[in-house]
Image (cartoon, coloured by chain):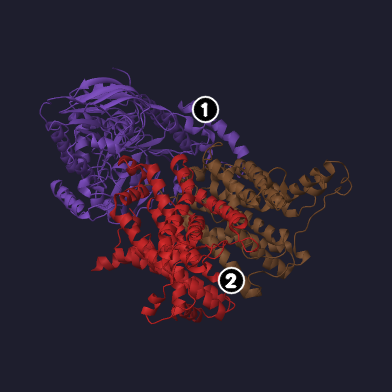
Amino acid sequence: MRPFFRNKGRKGEALGLGSASEPAIELVGIDKKFGAVHANKNINLTVAKGTIHGIIGENGAGKSTLMSILYGFYQADQGEIRISGRPVAIRDSQAAIAAGIGMVHQHFMLVEDFTVLENVMLGAEGGQLLAKGTSHARKELKRLESDYGMEVDPDAVVEELPVGTQQRVEILKALYRGAEILILDEPTGVLTPPEADHLFKVLRVLRDQGKTIILITHKLREIMAITDTVSVMRRGEMVATRTTSETTVEELAELMVGRRVLLRVEKGDAAPGNVLLSVRNLTVKDSRGVVMVDNVSFDVRAGEIVGIAGVAGNGQSELLEAIAGIRKPTSGEIWIDGKPAAGIDPRGLRELGLAHIPEDRHHMGLVLKFEEYENAILGYHRDPRYGRGYLLDLDAIREEAEEKIAKYDIRPPNPRLRTANFSGGNQQKIVVAREIERDPKLLLVGQPTRGVDIGAIEFIHKRIIDMRDAGKAVLLVSVELDEVRSLSDRILVMFAGKIVGEKSGDASEQMLGLMMAGIAA
Amino acid sequence: MDYFDILISILGSAIRLSIPLLFTALAGLFSERAGIFDIGLEGKMLASAFAAACVAHLTADPWLGLSAGIAVSILVSLVHGFASITNRGNQIVSGVALNFVAAGLTVVLGQAWFGQGGRTPQVPAQGRFSPIILPGADEIRSVPFIGPLYANVISGNNILTYIAFLMVPLSWWVLYRTRFGLRLRAVGENPGAVDTAGVSVAWLRYRALIVTGFLAGFAGTYLAIAQSAAFISNMSAGKGYIALAALIFAKWKPVPVMFACLLFGFLDAFANFMQGKSVPLIGEVPVQIFQALPYILTCVLLAGFIGTARPPRAGGVPYTKER
Amino acid sequence: MSTASVQLPRWINYGAIPLINLVLAFVCSGLVVWAIGESPWEALQLLVAGALGRGEGIGFTLFYTTSFIFTGLSVAVAIHAGLFNIGSEGQAYLGGLGAALVALSLDRYVPWYVTMPFAIIGAALFGAACAAVPAWLQAKRGSHIVITTIMFNFITSSLMNYVLVHLLIVPGKMAPETRTFLPGGQLPKLDWLIAMFGGKLGAAPLNVSFLIALVMCFLVWVLIWRTKLGYEMRTLGISPSAAAYAGIPYAKIVMITMLISGGLAGMMALNPVMGASGRLQIEFVGGAGFVGIAVSLMGRNHPAGIVLSALLFGILYQGGAELSFDMPSITRDMIVVIQGLVILFAGALEYMLRPAIVRLYQQVAGGR
């Protein structure tokens, strides 16, 4: 994929680990609990001025909580924050801004129907009336543009801008407020590789001009590519800090999960059979009429796993939802086991033998306020086995739920517990159990292990391979390239709504990365 | 009476009927643009009408009456804020509740204090806002067309009427030309953007609700001591809801709000005029049609048959910081 | 994670919290009574005595309760599907037209028990018809149902005004109302029910529709928690995206839910129109549709809770009427204040005390 940039020049002196360089920010003994959850445990961190510092960890490791404390969204229960050596109390975002901290959130904090200029000014208008501030902001924006190479039309309405440009507006907002320390929370999740490269270029310019940058991510590759130093968080603790040039991907991965991970899953050779899913010239537009899936065709056969690789936002989600009947295709054909399936609603598709583990279990796969047993029938609730006629047979439903709980080791084993009270991994098992136990012909799987603990990941991966070995067709969508590579027999790469190429399951990361960036085919 | 005279008289009456709508709809504009739905406009109107009538009756000073009306209306608004901002309650439920409290409490207190079945005593003439004759009105009355229009429609209204029309450009200016307005519009679309910009979402929304209370206070005062001379139980008679309809009809923009209120006021005036009159060929047109027309028009607009009405994105959703 | 995600036992969620909110509403009301110079305690005693003291009082109380059960159920059914139906008032009003048309056409020919099923259907159909347009606008055009149902309250009011003044009025009479139905178009009083407890119904209009209301409570319970349709409604109400994933048709469920909700509101009309006055009168609903909002919120949208809170409001309405006789300085509008405060505390401020209660609960439960 991207070359591992070895930062020259400044790097040697920027290594903050106990060296003489001036710390921009120090966290001392930060501790934060949310009820029973200990989100941050006695965190100590020093970031040197003029460096890019990465914070890496799995979902739920406590990275975002820590940064939210730094930005005044939450108050730490204990601990001290020092900026340039001086202790500061950050009670709210205003105090954080005053202390020179700027934040670029994962979900942009932009007013979509405002112009770039209005968004940049918001909160820093320079007086009760807008007129004076506006001309000042316009000039300042021009200056920032030329200083950092971040061109953007100040009068463009934000919702009409591409995602990468929207992110640029977020950075400009922070700089406009005079931020010396810039925090970026998972900044590349929504970016295409060229956009991400451009972002990294901007970040380097910023660092070279003396800004301090904290980059939060769970992508090891980014850490290696851009940071000077890196800290690893695991289960609320800061477990290690390393100089990037002196560590390896393997070491960081191990620190993140706490033990050696097997990135490859044990599986035998595929024995593909009949075509069970056939997609022909499928085009899907989103609610605004933008083409998200562009004339896509492919097949999935019985007994194989086809993975779709791509940077988030390149049409994979829409493709999956269109096949699952949640989104209406604009044109094209879908055939499931030889029967036309385009335009059929999800219930009808389930009857055709489709099962779907959706990408977002919180909003699609589960109703979090329901009790566990109620979720165990979601989508299949009209099935006669759950009650004849109009009525539900609660006894039968609960009995079956208990069976699945035992078989999938869902904890706690209580079908009357509210689903929201299960951990991420157990919630996902509820979905997986429901969809797999129906013995479908075709299984759609979206982000099967997002926010799921390691133990459950292995379990879920194994189930998916079991399905394949039992002669089912599996279509897998994941933004985790490692996951796609380790599970798939064939890999389709999506870029900008199109399938730009097909590779076997053992294709190299480099090759797939270039394809995901739309560079190679 | 020739047709022109009829038109002049209907227009004059339309203006008078649209003023409480205009104040109230502008009031709603500030809270809804800040992301707080306000079904409780009716209640604010009623509460302020009662307060204005009581104080004007006691002091015989309309301006003190107005101040009392505004103060009470702001108080009701703050309760709405306490429920929907501080406690993140359902904004619609809170609005409905406050409408009931206002409708009940005005009568209960009115009866307890004055013993006239919920009415307040007659407010003396010097305690009311009386019509102002603009300079030259009588002189040019005889000039065809322009004369009667000036004398009977533009002149001869009370001071609150002129204030209402001044509030339209003023609201526009506040919304689009001041820092408060920029932030207010932002908080109705994406409170997260405001919060991360270091501005308190809660305090901003409270301020928006104070403006709402302030403007609704004028509406109630107008009903009690400009249009009539006492508080009568439930005298707002659904005007708060028509104002809400006008606000939606105007797509949450200040100048269109004025036209929507004038239209609805005109329909009301026209209905009054048509009462019991028969139209050639059709016969008597039921006034109920005109009464229902503002609501029907709003539904048609909401259905998207005439343009789309997109409410502020964050409207109705209590703000919680994301983790 | 904050206190919001802590699961509390049912008895706290459905018992203690509503009760505390109710007490708060009453304390505020008591303050109002105290402020106008009367004794809140005395007022409460008079109120309870007026509502429950004699057979006739109980009869009136249960008469009001009947109306509130119908409108409370109407609001609750819609809330389960995530729809806030503020239009129960208008739907009940139009339901009255349905009931009256049936009664007017059948009362000469058949006894009441033949008329009744047709009247139930007529009332429900007309109520549902009034909900149908807002439902369609929500389902197909995405128009906010709160706003459209409010609009339809006013539209219905104008329509009924026209119908009564121009079409159904008895020629030569001034009052805009229909003729009085013959016994074949009236629902009989429930003297025997009160007599069973040794009281006398007197002039109280408690009638058969009370029993219909109780049957509807049971049916709504079955619908929400025991049927596939109810499951789909609840899924849609909590998570529209999960409903889409599960193949639950949004437009269809919205339509069906609102038709049921409107139908239940329409049936409310049986009680005053065919049970009490025996004729269709102008503005006969008298705010019962709005009380339904309070009843549903207070009863946590559960039929059992709705019966209890409807009874509470029945007591308030009857007791309030008696109270205003005994304490002339307190008008009947005091009920409207209490009603508003109940909606405020049980609805809009429902989360106000939760964090404190959660902390208290954790202390007590954690200490065990």
At label 1, the amino acid type is: Asp
Q: Secondary structure at mark 2?
A: helix
Q: Chain of mark 2?
A: B
Q: Position of residue A190 (x, y in %)?
A: 36, 32
Instruction: Return the residue nearer the eye: A249 or A453.
Output: A453
At label 2, the amino acid type is: Val
Locate the C terminus of chain C by quadrant: bottom left
Chain C pictured colour: red
Q: Chain of mark 1?
A: A
Q: Is residue A257 left or right of residue A118?
A: left
> Of the numbered discs in the image, which one, if any, rests on residue B80?
none
> Of the numbered discs in the image, which one, if any, rests on residue A153?
1
Q: Position of residue A352 (x, y in %)?
A: 23, 34
Q: What chain is colored purple?
A: A
Q: Which residue is denoted by mark 2 in the rendering?
A: B108
Chain B pictured colour: brown
Query: How many C-alpha atoms fall within 10 Å of the one at disc 1: few (<14), some, or many (≥20)?
Result: some
